[in-house]
Image (cartoon, helix red, strand yellow):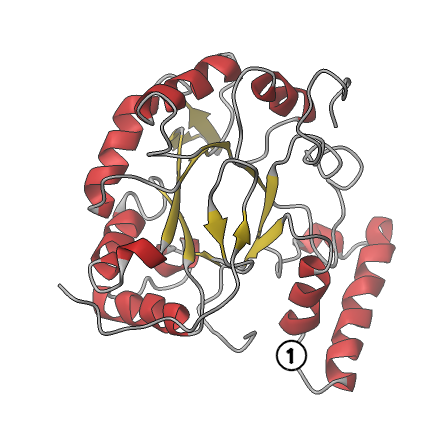
Amino acid sequence: MEAETQAPEVPRVKLGSQGLEVWRLGLGCFQLTRLINAPLSDEEGIAFIKQAFDRGITFFDTADRYGQHKNEILIGKALKELPREKVQVASKFGIVKLEGGVLMTNGKCVRACCEASLDRLGVEHKDLCYQHRVDLTVRIEDTMRGAEEVSGGGEGEVHRAVGGEPRHDQACACCASHPITALQMRWWSFWTRDIKDETVPLCRVPNLMQMMPLTGRDLGIGIVAFSPLVISPYRFSEDNLENTILHVQGANLAAKHGCNPAQPALAWLLHQGNDVFPIPGTRKFSFS
């Protein structure tokens, strides 16, 4: 089906050093099928994704566990109405189930998870393949080796990446033997800087022999910042007064310039470097 929707021409930059190019601002799709809020119907979800595309967004992030597979299915339906060659799709694998309030992970199920994702998305390849959460019972190098095998022997059919919130040492261990396109992390935003001391420096100069111990910028890895507009309730406490003040300052800055608080927050994050890619998970486009 020939898509009628045409995205505006927006500059794209390399996400990581493995060749993938995206627009700097993406869309986290979790909210589209989230149970806390009423999930969108297929018609509403497809229209929403097409609206995002119309505004220049081409990088869409999903996961096999979002909406118990429904999120990938929804993205797949939307892709049928968009020019696939202009869209970059990222999806995550590795969370098996939620048991007793604890996420159960499986770092050995790479091939089965990725093949099932491709089927739900209705595509021949994912542009970015993340490990959603690290399985501590499996060496991360082995999990990434499985992702490489799924990618067709490293021919670029699936760009490998460690997603979720890997520890600094886990990312380093993986990078030592497998190329990584991106790390997807939460704590990098206008209000939270938790990853700036270890993970952010880790991601830059791709020369392992000269950069030990490794720190993300050392390795030419993109930083995909999810939930860049969300602050957890615990951030507003006496122990976190600094972040509370930043929130107030951000709101005041937005009021001063006649915009909503999301705009300066995203502008700040984009200003941190061309290797930072925010993927706000919003149902509204008032931030654009």
Looking at the picture, does residue 176 appear above or below residue 101? above
Quick one: which residue is furthest to the left in this view?
A: 1
What amino acid type should be assigned to the residue bearing mark 1? Answer: Asn
Measuring from the top left, give residue 247's x and y in whole percent: 77, 65
Q: Is residue 273 left or right of residue 43?
A: right
Q: Quadrant of residue 264?
A: bottom right
State the residue in front, 284 or 179. 179
State the residue in front, 32 or 234. 32
Looking at the picture, does residue 152 appear above or below residue 24? above
Q: Is residue 70 left or right of residue 175?
A: left
Q: Which residue is mark 1?
A: 260
Looking at the picture, does residue 256 appear above or below residue 14? below
- Which residue appears at 78% of the width and 85% of the height? 256
Measuring from the top left, give residue 154's x and y in whole percent: 39, 24
Q: Is residue 73 left or right of residue 50?
A: left
Q: Is residue 248 left or right of residue 158?
A: right
Determine the secondary structure under disc 1. Answer: loop
Which quadrant of the rendered structure holds the C terminus? bottom right
Which quadrant of the rendered structure holds the N terminus? bottom left
Looking at the picture, does residue 223 appear above or below residue 262? above
